[in-house]
Amino acid sequence: MSLVNWRTINIDALDPETSTNFDISTLSPAVAPVSASGVQNLAGQIRGLLRGGDSEGALKGALENAPYGGDERSKGVHLATVIEILQSIKQSEMSPMLSRIYSSEGGTESLDVLMKYLYVC
């Protein structure tokens, strides 16, 4: 009989579907880096839409251009912009606006991004 202590065998190394046998970094999508100045420029454009009365366009623009590749400062600036947009929308206009965004192209992804921002708050 062998003197191998079976309790010390790493069975995960023998399983082909375990995370030790493939690169975990492939699970996250590659995102382009975003500069803080780019996020601030976008925030200025979105505020321009808000001042012009196009709150739906501002919300769509903010949700479609989330800075996934940005640093924490740029993500904070974008979060503040999204909050500013949401605060400017009347309660009676929110449901119809979200329905229009949902039915538009890429609407489900935009609303997923909105939910991520709401969870952060």
Image (cartoon, rainbow, N blue to C red):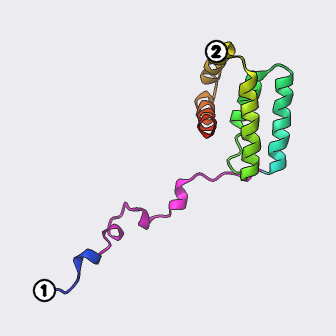
**Amino acid under disc 2:** Pro
Helix, strand or loop at disc 1? loop
Q: On residue 58, which mark appears? A: none
Helix, strand or loop at disc 2? helix
How would you classify the magenta stretch by its main secondary structure? loop
- When the figure is inspected, residue 39 is found, relative to residue 2, above or below; the finding is above
Q: Which residues are magenta?
A: 9-34
How many residues crowd mark 1 within 10 Å: few (<14), some (14–19), many (20+)?
A: few
Residue 11 position, x and y percent, is 30, 69
User: For the C terminus, which image quadrant?
Assistant: top right
Name the residue: 83% across, 43% down.
40
**Amino acid under disc 1:** Met
Residue 18 position, x and y percent, is 38, 62
Name the residue: 50% across, 64% down.
23
Name the residue: 81% across, 31% down.
46
Disc 2 and disc 1 in contact, CB within 8 angstroms: no
How many residues crowd mark 2 within 10 Å: few (<14), some (14–19), many (20+)?
A: few
Q: Which residue is the site of mark 2?
A: 96
Q: Which residue is the site of mark 1?
A: 1
Name the residue: 19% across, 87% down.
3
Q: Earlier in the sequence, mark 2 or mark 1?
A: 1
Is residue 96 left or right of 56 when viewed as pictured? left
Residue 37 position, x and y percent, is 84, 48
Q: CA distance from mark 2 to mark 1?
A: 74 Å
Q: Tag count in the figure?
A: 2
Q: Which residue occupies the foreground of this view, 105 or 89?
A: 89
Q: Residue furthest top?
A: 92
- When the figure is inspected, residue 67 is found, relative to residue 58, above or below; the finding is below
Q: Which residue occupies the foreground of this view, 98 or 14?
A: 98
